[in-house]
Amino acid sequence: MNGTFVFVLCIIAIVTCGNIVSTYLKRRDKRPDNNEELEDTLSKVDALEERIRVLERIVTEKRYDLKGEIDAL
């Protein structure tokens, strides 16, 4: 009886793992469809990085008039 119970549990575990792997592979293949959304997000990140570089340059200058620099932007 004990051997049969272990055998049934092994079959259930194999089927469950197979379903998990199958679902993962199906969802993984669908990700590249959002290429346009990804490119849009990356362009926004690039624009934000450039703005941060400008702000860092303004703040790290030896003599700066922060209000005047921000108003000039």
Image: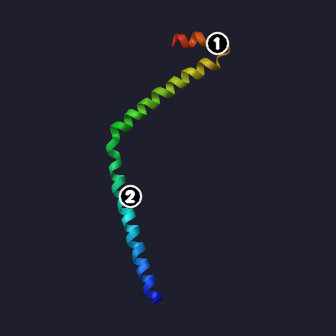
User: Front-most of 24 and 1?
Assistant: 1
Q: How many marks?
A: 2
**Which residue is located at x 67 percent, y 12 percent?**
63
The secondary structure type at the circle numbered 2 is: helix
Rendering quarter of residue 25: bottom left
Q: CA distance from mark 2 to mark 1?
A: 54 Å
Relative image position of residue 58 (x, y in whole percent): 60, 17
Q: Amino acid at mark 2?
A: Tyr
Which quarter shows the N terminus? bottom left
User: Front-most of 2 and 70?
Assistant: 2
**Which residue is located at x 41 percent, y 34 percent?**
41
Q: Amino acid at mark 1?
A: Tyr
Relative image position of residue 36 (x, y in whole percent): 33, 37
User: Mark 1, residues whose alpha carbon is within 10 Å: few (<14), some, or many (≥20)?
Assistant: few
Left or right: where 49 falls relative to 36: right
Which residue is at the far right? 62
User: On the image, numbered disc 2 is attached to which residue?
Assistant: 24
User: Mark 2, residues whose alpha carbon is within 10 Å: few (<14), some, or many (≥20)?
Assistant: few
Give yes or no for contact between labels 2 and 1 (Cβ–Cβ under 8 Å). no
Residue 26 - label? none
On screen, residue 35 above or below 5: above
Nearest to viewer (mark 2 / mark 1): 2
The secondary structure type at the circle numbered 1 is: loop
Q: Tell me which label, 2 or 1, sits earlier in the chain.
A: 2
Relative image position of residue 32 (x, y in whole percent): 34, 46
User: On the image, numbered disc 1 is attached to which residue?
Assistant: 64
Left or right: where 64 falls relative to 49: right
Left or right: where 15 falls relative to 65: left
